[in-house]
Amino acid sequence: GAGVSQSPSNKVTEKGKDVELRCDPISGHTALYWYRQSLGQGLEFLIYFQGNSAPDKSGLPSDRFSAERTGGSVSTLTIQRTQQEDSAVYLCASSYKRDQPQHFGDGTRLSIL
Amino acid sequence: ELKVEQNPLFLSMQEGKNYTIYCNYSTTSDRLYWYRQDPGKSLESLFVLLSNGAVKQEGRLMASLDTKARLSTLHITAAVHDLSATYFCAVDGEGLQGAQKLVFGQGTRLTINP
């Protein structure tokens, strides 16, 4: 079946602009996760959504970052007033149950000029 | 705060040899995951380890978990070039409502030379 889908695959934008990254999880997966992967910091947890519960935002690096998940499915990660240090690959993952692995999308490579 | 450390971070080995990657973590958890990442690609799940003493094997890879020692190992037997990739362990920091809150190790970049 279809995997986790992310768009765009690449995004280049100027410093100070806002960006929106989209994630479409595997159908039926109740949990959705966002991570950031960069050379200096490795893989960092950003935020997760689990069912109808309030999201765990504890990994968001600043208040310029926000995310929402509409209808328990598609999620959007928004970065406002982008900075060069935001350049990274942003990965989305989803899972069905606690004891099953997360399935990752191909990521969005974000470059801030 | 949960911390996860892998070693080695870089590993270059010859085909046919055996080696082990270690994953240590700092706080109690009984859920650990191993992932593989090829260059420019996303993460692929390899193993799910859910209890002390768990051992999983797939082909030339075998993973184990010792929750008392807070240690997992990924053993490679008779390595072949196709296993060249970066391997990550991730420990479940126990999110709310049954979600996983994974903390990843730094990754081990494995290069297998013919």
Image (cartoon, coloured by chain):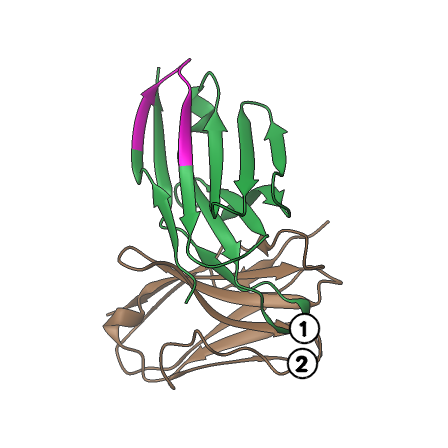
Chain colours: A brown, B green
Q: Amino acid at mark 2?
A: Ser
Whether residue B12 appears in magenta in the rendering, the answer is yes
Whether residue B39 appears in magenta in the rendering, the answer is no
Whether B87 is drawn above or below B92: the answer is: above
Residue at the extreme front:
B68
Report the side of B16 relative to A106 (left or right): left
Report the side of B99 relative to A17 (left or right): right
Q: Which residue is mark 1?
A: B97
Query: Residue A2's spot in the image, x, y percent?
Result: 69, 52
Q: What segment is highlighted magenta in the picture?
A: B11-21
Q: Which residue is mark 2?
A: A53
- In front here: B23 or A38? B23
Instruction: Answer few, some or many: residues within 10 Å of disc 1's Cα (few below 14, many 20 plus, some between 14 and 19).
Output: some
Q: Residue at x 45, y 79 (%)?
A: A78
Instruction: Please identify the quadrant where the C terminus of chain A is shown.
Output: bottom left
Instruction: Answer few, some or many: residues within 10 Å of disc 2's Cα (few below 14, many 20 plus, some between 14 and 19).
Output: few
- State the SS at label 1: helix
Letter of the chain that mark 2 sits on in the rendering: A
Letter of the chain that mark 1 sits on in the rendering: B
- In front here: A80 or A39? A39
Tag on residue B61? none
Measured Cα–Cα span from mark 1 to mark 2 = 7 Å
- In front here: B110 or A113? B110
